[in-house]
Image (cartoon, grey):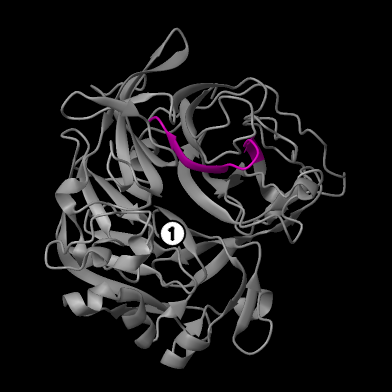
């Protein structure tokens, strides 16, 4: 999704796979399935490890609490939990030796690595067909007053990182147990210092600045367009607003114009609403957008793009009320009327969806809706979150990570439901299909019990896939009782 993804498009991913046979052939009344990248997995709701197709292998390159992270002063401390977004940066153009930036979606007190969230830079190398980690360097966020819940992000053309703070504390009291320093910082109350995009120099190991011009809200992810000025930004809130930022100068993200998306009444087009550039407005960017009439969404997650199309994962919410924003004059996205409206301003959206925005017309539509999967891959596709777009053997695919919001509504089958546990997966979706359904998804990975699958990223040659296995159940056998990052080979 990030400029790493752009590199992948510039160098089409050459995947060679073996068995092309479906696990359970579709009925003969359906079209012949020509998918041959891998043998799709069946669902598994009793899994405590990582399941991937035959012919593929994974190496563990990061384990929270076990590996050591080195600070600038040379001291080493146990690696953080909750690895999320990853970005591969080649060393001298290599696909087998590079840096892997890793976000930490954490908000805990840490005397050693700093309170709140964070990031790390791994130097990794592939030797004898095995990925190994050479070193892990700590990223220092104290220069910008700390950070919280670093979730998605992107690699810029300048090889800096934009990391998203998925949090928006309402006051200093809300920082208890997450961040101890409540003194004012840079003219803001400390709680107001969280909820921004943050630019990081991974090589110096320091955060550069918080990007106030992009607004304060529950930042989830960002996608930079080829002009290096236009950036699409997602908001993981209920309700949420979809934002666009246009920098005044290419590659300089500290000043520019923030916009919010408004869908047309008929859903066939839309417009961008201008958010005032003053700090008072940027501190409450979502509320300002809603008062201007921005369209309401439900927990936007990751965002990616190709050409004139932008793709957004929307994870959904079991039950929510929109009285407050509707009172402002904002309206829910028009597709909620068909899928999720339960009377008055009450809604239920248990499965979520992947959206597609046409940049030419500004029409926003559901590309693929969550829900039951039948036919060849029984199971349920729900709550899409992390997402990566790449070209594989001449076809464009979205790799979609699940992050279930619970195991109700048939999101988890037996025996997982009986254990009150969740199981998340990664799917491939062929973008050549103009009107896909959940039945067109191909299950590539099943994560261990309790985990969120996230951080999907490829090397530029498409031969290695990186995935974060976040917060798995502590009852799983090692190493999947802790957060890990894995490198998958075999493409």
Magenta region, mostly helix, strand or loop? strand
> Which one is nearer the viewer's eye here, 164 or 160?
164
Q: Is residue 384 visible?
A: yes
User: Residue at the spot x=43%, y=56% of the render?
Assistant: 303
- Could you tell me residue 491's position as x and y percent? 54, 25
User: Residue at the spot x=36%, y=22% of the render?
Assistant: 95
User: Residue at the spot x=39%, y=83% of the render?
Assistant: 290
Indicate left or right for 376 with 253 as reference.
right
> Which one is nearer the viewer's eye here, 216 or 16?
216
Q: Quadrant of residue 461?
A: top left
Q: What are the residue bounds of the magenta stretch? A: 443-459
Residue farthest along the right direction in this orientation: 28
> Which one is nearer the viewer's eye here, 444 or 287?
287
- Could you tell me residue 231's position as x and y percent? 29, 59
- Could you tell me residue 466's position as x and y percent? 46, 32
Count of numbered circles on the image: 1
Q: Is residue 434 magenta?
A: no
User: Residue at the spot x=78%, y=33% of the render?
Assistant: 23
Q: Is residue 277 visible?
A: no
Q: Quadrant of residue 112?
A: top left
Q: Is residue 353 above or below residue 13?
A: below
Q: Is residue 221 above or below residue 316?
A: above
Indicate left or right for 144 with 51 as reference.
left
Q: Is residue 447 magenta?
A: yes
- Could you tell me residue 30's position as x and y percent? 82, 49
Considering the numbered disc 1 on the image, is that residue within a helix, a strand or a loop? strand
> Would you call the spot at circle 1 few (<14 residues within 10 Å), some (14-19), or many (20 or more)?
some
Which residue was labeled with disc 1?
Answer: 309
> Which one is nearer the viewer's eye here, 94 or 306?
94
């Amino acid at each position: 999704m990030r400029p790493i993804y752009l590199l992948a498009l510039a160098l089409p991913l050459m995947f060679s796979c073996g068995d092309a046979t479906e696990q359970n052939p579709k009925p003969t009344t359906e079209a012949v399935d020509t998918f041959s990248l891998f043998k799709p997995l069946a669902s598994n709701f009793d899994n405590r490890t990582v399941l991937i197709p035959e012919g593929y292998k994974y190496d563990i390159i990061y384990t929270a609490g076990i590996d050591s992270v080195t600070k600038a002063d040379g001291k080493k401390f146990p690696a953080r939990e909750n690895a999320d977004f990853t970005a591969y940066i080649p060393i001298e153009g290599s696909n087998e030796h590079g840096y892997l930036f890793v976000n930490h979606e954490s908000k805990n007190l840490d005397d050693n690595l700093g309170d709140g969230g964070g990031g790390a830079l791994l130097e990794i190398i592939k030797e004898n067909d095995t990925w190994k980690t050479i070193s892990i360097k700590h990223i220092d966020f104290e220069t910008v007053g700390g950070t919280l819940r670093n979730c998605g992000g992107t690699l810029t053309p300048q090889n800096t990182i934009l990391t998203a703070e998925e949090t928006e504390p309402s006051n200093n009291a809300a920082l208890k147990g997450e961040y101890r320093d409540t003194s004012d910082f840079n003219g803001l109350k400390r709680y107001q210092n969280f909820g921004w995009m943050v630019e990081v120099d991974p090589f110096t190991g320091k955060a550069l600045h918080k990007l106030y011009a992009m607004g304060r809200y529950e930042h989830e992810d960002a996608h930079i367009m080829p002009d290096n000025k236009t950036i699409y930004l997602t908001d993981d809130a209920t309700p949420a607003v979809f934002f666009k930022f246009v920098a005044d100068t290419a590659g300089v993200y500290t000043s520019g114009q923030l916009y919010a998306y408004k869908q047309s009444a008929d859903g066939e087009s839309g417009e961008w609403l201008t958010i005032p550039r003053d700090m008072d407005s940027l501190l409450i960017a979502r509320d300002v957008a809603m008062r201007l009439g921005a369209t309401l969404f439900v927990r936007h997650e990751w965002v990616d793009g190709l050409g004139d199309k932008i793709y957004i994962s929307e994870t959904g919410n079991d039950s929510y009320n929109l009285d407050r924003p509707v009172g402002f004059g904002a309206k829910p996205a028009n597709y909620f009327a068909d899928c999720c409206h339960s009377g008055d301003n009450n809604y239920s959206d248990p499965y979520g969806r992947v959206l597609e925005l046409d940049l030419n017309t500004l029409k926003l539509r559901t590309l693929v809706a969550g829900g039951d999967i039948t036919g060849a891959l029984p199971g349920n596709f729900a709550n899409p979150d992390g997402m990566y777009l790449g070209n594989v053997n001449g076809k464009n695919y979205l790799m979609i990570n699940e992050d279930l919001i619970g195991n109700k509504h048939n999101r988890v089958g037996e025996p997982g439901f009986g254990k009150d546990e969740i199981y998340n997966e990664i799917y491939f979706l062929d973008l050549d299909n103009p009107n896909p359904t959940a039945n067109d998804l191909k299950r590539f990975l099943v994560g261990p019990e309790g985990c969120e699958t996230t951080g999907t990223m490829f090397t530029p040659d498409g031969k290695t896939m990186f995935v974060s296995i976040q917060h798995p159940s502590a009852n799983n056998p090692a190493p999947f009782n802790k957060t890990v990052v894995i490198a998958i080979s075999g493409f």
